[in-house]
């Protein structure tokens, strides 16, 4: 029974704690000896260690290797998130949307504010597949790819319009991103995002039932990750307060010039 219960528990704890840690690190004061830069260098060290761990477990079929690949992919994802929220890896445009911009003009401006970040994420996903595509344990590549796919979906839904914009997650230096979001009850993409994630989740659960050992653990971890992504998407449109889950991290004040 534990082989089915442990992956969802691990995924939920890693998702909740990892998101909170990124928020806390990004809200460190910018002054006091360059603490933000030191934090980013340290995070880069963890990312390099995660890559080394992925290499060590790439050809292992064990349950531990599946968990290691999953955790290491989340660490790599956390590095990208910290780089974005910290302002190190965003895009060539760093100002609010032009007032009254619509259609392709608005979309082009929105893409420019994220461009380097998006290209870095895509390059990382492709590199992981080139590295792990024929390995015995491609869990890290699958994990990063699913995180990337669902994050692209979330960004597009925010662009098209959702009820909860969660602007309190943005540090002051990135508040201009809110000008590219729309607040509306629903949008036409959201049902397809939910349906697609639900179908893939069902496929992964079916795969878990047909496998054992590390393959089963990987299927369950990925299914749990997609379920959490579904929850995040639902939080955008339901009358809920998404930030309540990370109030302990958001409680730290940020400096306006950080």
Image: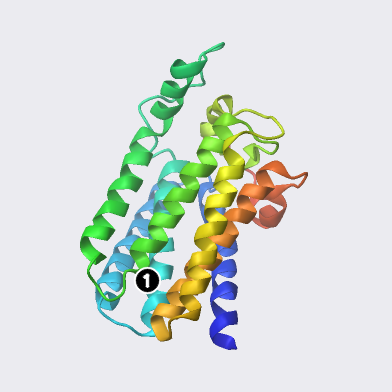
Q: Is residue 73 above or below residue 85?
A: below
Q: Is residue 36 left or right of residue 187?
A: left
Could you say where residue 209 lies in the image, as x and y percent from the top left?
A: 50, 80
Task: Quarter of the image for the N terminus: give it.
Answer: bottom right
Q: Residue furthest right?
A: 239
Residue drawn at x 72%, y 52% is 244
Q: Nearer the viewer, residue 30 or 228?
A: 228
**At 55% from the left edge and 31% from the top edge, which residue is drawn?**
159
* Point 26% across, 77% down: residue: 56
| Relative height, residue 236 to residue 111 (above, below) | below
Describe the colour scheme in one phrase: rainbow
Q: Nearer the viewer, residue 89 or 62?
A: 62
Q: How many marks?
A: 1
**Quadrant of res 147:** bottom left
Q: Which residue is under mark 1?
A: 69
Placement of 207 over or under 115, stated as above or below: below
Q: Quadrant of residue 218?
A: bottom left
Q: Nearer the viewer, residue 234 or 36?
A: 234
Task: Report x, y in % for residue 143.
Answer: 41, 62
User: Image point 57% across, 64% down: which residue?
Assistant: 17
Q: Position of residue 109 (x, y in %)?
A: 43, 22
Tell me the crowding category of disc 1: few under 14, some 14 to 19, or many 20 or more residues within 10 angstroms, Cα based: many
């Amino acid at each position: 029974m534990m082989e089915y219960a442990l992956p969802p528990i691990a995924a939920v704890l890693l998702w909740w704690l990892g998101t909170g840690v990124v928020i806390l690190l990004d809200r460190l004061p910018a002054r006091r000896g360059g603490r933000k830069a030191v934090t980013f260098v340290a995070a880069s060290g963890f990312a390099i260690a995660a890559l080394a761990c992925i290499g060590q477990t790439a050809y292992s079929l064990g349950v531990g290797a599946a968990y290691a690949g999953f955790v290491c992919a989340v660490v790599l994802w956390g590095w990208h998130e910290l780089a974005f929220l910290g302002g190190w890896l965003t895009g060539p445009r760093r100002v609010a949307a032009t007032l009254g911009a619509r259609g392709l003009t608005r979309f082009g401006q929105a893409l420019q504010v994220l461009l380097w970040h998006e290209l870095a994420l895509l390059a990382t996903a492709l590199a992981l597949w080139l590295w792990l595509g024929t390995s015995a344990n491609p869990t890290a590549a699958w994990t990063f790819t699913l995180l990337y796919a669902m994050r692209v979906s979330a960004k597009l839904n925010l662009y098209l319009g959702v009820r909860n914009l969660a602007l309190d997650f943005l540090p002051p230096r990135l508040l201009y991103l809110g000008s590219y979001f729309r607040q509306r009850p629903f949008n036409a993409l959201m049902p397809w995002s939910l349906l697609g994630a639900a179908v893939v989740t069902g496929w992964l659960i079916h795969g878990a039932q047909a496998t054992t050992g590390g393959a089963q653990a990987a299927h369950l971890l990925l299914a749990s990750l997609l379920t959490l992504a579904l929850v995040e998407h639902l939080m955008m449109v339901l009358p809920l307060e998404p930030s309540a889950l990370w109030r302990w991290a958001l409680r730290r004040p940020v400096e306006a010039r950080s």
